[in-house]
Amino acid sequence: MNEIRLNKMYGGKSRCQQLRCRIFLAGLLFLVCFFWLAPLQAKEVDYINISSPFLNKIPIAITQFKAFNGHAVEVALGKKAEQILEDGLGFTGYLKVLDPAAFLSSPAQTGIQLGQINFRDWTGIGADLLITGGIEEQENQVTLKLRLFDTLNSKLVVGKIYTGASSQIRRMIHLFCSEVSHKLTGNWGVFNSKISFVSTVNGHKEIFVCEFDGHNPKQITHHQSISLSPNWSFDGRWLAYVSYARGKPDIYIKNLKEKRGAIVNQNGSNISPDWMPGQLNLAAALSFSGNQEIYLLTKKGEVTKRITNSRGVNLSPTFSPDGKKIAFTSSRGGTPQIYIKDLDSGDVKRVTFKGRYNTSPAWSPDGKKIAYVGIEKNKINIFVINLTSVSGMPVQLTMNQQDNEDPSWSPDGSLIAFTSNREGGVSRLFVMTSAGTDQRRLLTLTGKQSQPGWSKSTSFEN
Amino acid sequence: MNRKLWINLMAAMLVAGLFMTVSCAKKTIVSDGTTIEDQAKMEAEAQAKALAEQERIKTQEIEDQMAREQALKEAKILAAQNRFTHQNIHFEFDSALLSSMAKVLIKEKAEWLGSNSGVAVVIQGHCDERGTTDYNIALGERRAIAVRNYLVNLGISGSRLTTVSFGEEKPLDSGTSEAAYRKNRRAQFVIK
């Protein structure tokens, strides 16, 4: 079992942070690190263990942004930035954003820097973490100054300056959220990730893409057919999905920017594509042999290797994060169950034993768990099984909330997106923490949504 | 003498009257004779006409009968075809096994395919909405293939039978009752 490490390392210190300077978005956006953090030692990572199933939320205070010039546009943009920051950090599921009504002091007036903060005002209201923000706006150019403090140790944890067009505020705030995430969890988090999904449009099913928090949904396909099962390549540049555009299920491999790709249209059903970690190759289930079997494919759609060979259907491959194993669904034992195949040794082992219907495996980014869908008592729900534990007993993450399926891990493993019809029987996208807490709807869109596929790109440095 | 004269005169008049009557009657008869001749002709004509009409009606009736029989035959063919395309093969949940009822229906399909040898069909496999999208595509395909294999075993050429799975994407009944699910778990025949 994992140890619970949610306690703040009160004695812990951050390692010396180097001065860094980066340019993003072709010079549009500059990220400038401007703080010399006091030489601090020890690990950076141990504030929060996001994979802990007994996660307590860390209370964090986010102050009103200090408007350096004080004009109306600047103040309004500051409010907007503050809201994006609160929403973004609240979305993580491991931070509890405190109500500003409880705040005892106002750094927007008294100063947002280290020497200007009275940490007792913040520890006194139970804020373990504090973020102060400042904004300068001039001729549509915005500079944001953001600092994360550890109030219990009266320490600056991370400080950043971002400069860019005012239309880039959301992006800049999410860059800072990534920094916060990295300092608190050791992982850059979800803020630079995207989610693909299926939505109905005029009775057809099309592939859509939105940002990590459901913002900005965009329709990607216009097949006017049934399109399903979108899956991202590791670099976030390619999508593979299934479409009936030619009358039967075929796999479409598409480079999003360059509008090129390939179609896997072998005889039979070509379904459930899953990109390999770190490579532009895929696994998918094809049935040209007369039986649904899993194969490896290139991004051009060429079959390179057969992975399964069994009675019963084999489908829904999901790679382990190191790319050395594939978990999949197979009905070789009479009922659909999850199996793992070691690609080097060829060994196959069964993972699920409880229940008569377990499908849709999704391998966690840390490689230790598999989320999947199981039917019990006529209800379909999401379970997670720990591969490292001896007992191998699954934990049920959703229950008594209608049908829940299609689990997809966030790139940092802290969240799981899924489909649920809990709101009025209509299929919609939801998200929860990997422990099953904080279940909420991801986005509001007309039609029915399903099959979220979270992108793997997790660092904002790519 | 006077009285005798009267009697004679009366007799003479009677005779004259008789003559006149006779001559009159004779004339009428002659005239009647020609009418009778015409009537006979007309009657013959009418009879012929009636006969022809009868013939026509008879032919018409036969034609009608034939048309009716043809329509009936066509209706029967259509009904058989409708039955072929609308009578679905049903399955248990998460199963592609053919029940005895399913086998009876498939034999009926085989008969139809046997007497419609020019027809090629697509066997679609479908599932109810329970279970996952991908698995249901695989399951639907197994259902379609199970039906196809049974038909091939009954002597229908495999080249006339293609399969496609729609998984849970095309339910006949969008309800969530067991009755709706049962309806949706099916193999369905579509004539190419």
Image (tube, helix red, strand yellow):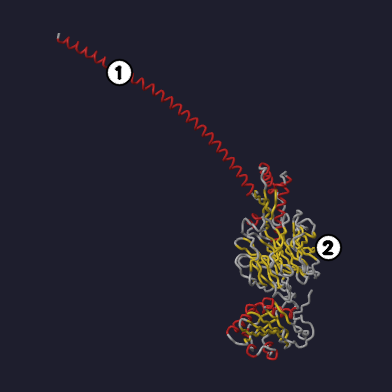
Task: Please identify, in this view, whether the residue under mark 2 or under mark 1 is nearer the observer.
Answer: 1
- Residue type indicated by callout 2: Asp
Q: What residue is rendered at 77% in x and 62% in y?
A: A298
Circle 1 sits on which residue?
B25
**Residue A445 at what x, y percent from top left?**
61, 68
Q: Position of residue B32 (x, y in %)?
A: 34, 21
Residue A104 visible to an observer of this rendering: no
Q: Pinpoint residue A274: horizontal percent, then vertical percent.
A: 74, 64
Q: Is residue A185 left or right of residue B182?
A: right
- Residue A200 lies, with reference to residue B155, above or below; the image says below
Tell if the residue under mark 2 belongs to the same chain as the one under mark 1: no
Local crowd at mark 2 within 10 Å, few (<14), some, or many (≥20)? few
Q: Residue furthest top?
A: B1
Relative to B34, does residue A65 appear above or below in the rendering?
below
Against A247, residue B7 (above or below) is above
Q: Which mark is residue A347?
A: 2
Disc 1: host chain = B
